[in-house]
Image (spheres, helix red, strand yellow):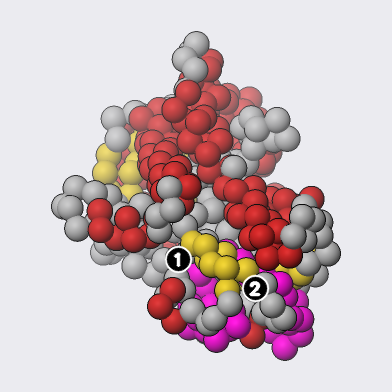
Amino acid sequence: MTCLFGGERIAVIGMGYVGLPLAVAFTNQGAAVTGFDTRKKRLNELRSGRDSGQEFTPQILSAIHIDYTDDTEALAACDVFIVCVPTPLDAEGRPDLSDLEAACQSVGAALRAGALIVYESTVFPGVTEDICIPILEKRSGLKAGQDFMVAYSPERINPGDQKHCLRTVTKVVAGHTPAALARASRLYGSIVDAGVYAAPTIRVAEATKLAENVQRDVNIALMNEMARIFGALGLDATNVFQAARTKWNFHPYLPGLVGGHCIGVDPMYLAYCARQTGIEPSLVLTARNVNDSMPGFIAQQCVDRLVRQHGPGGQRGRRVTVLGVTFKENLPDIRNTPARALIQKLQAFGIVPQVVDPWAEPEDVVTQLGVPLCPDDGIEPSDGVILAVAHDEFVTGGWQLVDRCLGGVGKVVIDVKAVLDPENMPPEIDFFRL
């Protein structure tokens, strides 16, 4: 790969799990990069060489130079803008484009003739051309396709995955015009070894991101529903799935708690635009409901076993240790984590949750989940354990760690991730796994 930037300065808008890898990659290729974010705390930690997302080590961050800023005036010196801001759901479960629209205003104010703007934020088809471009044109007084170029490239970052990363995953790119597509393709081709796939339109590229994650959500929901059915039949669902995987066309999706930035959000973006066309996305929404119901299902499994051990109402006041509250293993991020609903369900049943997670930030757990994070050396004996996230520390600790969390009689263990070997289970444990 060769550097194609010349004297251009690239602004990456949003220094999260999508924007930071882009900024680092372009800097490593010799580009001058401005990393823009409105979160002063995030900027300060990056300036100090620390990434709370733990995607990059201090050694990597301190060895490169990125101009981190929250000053919109600094964007005026930039020629390329890559927008990677969050596009979450609002309180009603509808797309929330407020951060994206704010980014368009900031970029529009900084635009000058010849600029390229690329959007990576997840949206439903039509947002880039029907919402973003009009904001850019009104704010700048310039015309898209004539004075500046616009492209879209759906982010495919899988946090914590060093194998499937920015460099190794094919980059889908689409342009508002053929010239925009060509320029954006050259831009990404300089940092992505796996190459660039040119989508025919921006709307196709926008829909691609939704299709990828809705498929995952539906398949995981199917596995969750089957796991519940097999469990009700007295079967170990893990054993069933392991046997089924011996067939060449059985896809190895696994049941479990579903959260994070994509799977829990993207289906609702597709559902929103489907309803705009008069289509009711029944399968998409059913799958979402199944996955959203899993924290309650897990909590109910814990309650049923505590009652079985201690009699009616036997769950009340019982301490249950929850191992893992981040949305994914070996990551510190707890945004959109299903652990929030799990903890709330346990509390509603009168259970006292004791949260243990070596990856999560204590301050974030208190702020977002409303419970304190228990240090490893402060674990109190519990009546039950729910292994919710398969952090390496928990998998390595295995039954020895679980047994250390338990105390007394009538002990309950719920293995959500099916990482504990039942053959090595200590005695007198009421065990359930998905």
Determine which quarter of the picture holds residue 213.
top left
In magenta segment, residue 302: no
Whole-angstrom CA distance, mark 1 to mark 2, is 18 Å
Question: Picture coordinates of residue 361 (x, y %)?
Answer: 70, 71
Q: In which quarter of the image is the N terminus?
A: bottom left
In magenta segment, residue 384: yes
Residue 146 as seen in the image, left or right of residue 106: left
The magenta region covers 374-403
Above or below — where is 392 with respect to 288?
below
Which mark identifies residue 386?
A: none
Question: Picture coordinates of residue 337 (x, y %)?
Answer: 62, 55
Between tags 1 and 2, which lies in front? 2
- What residue did someone put label 1 on? 418
Query: Residue at horizontal 71%, vertical 72%?
Result: 383
Question: Picture coordinates of residue 353 (x, y %)?
Answer: 75, 65
Dot 1: element: loop
Q: Is residue 57 visible?
A: no
Query: Residue at horizontal 43%, vertical 48%?
Result: 233
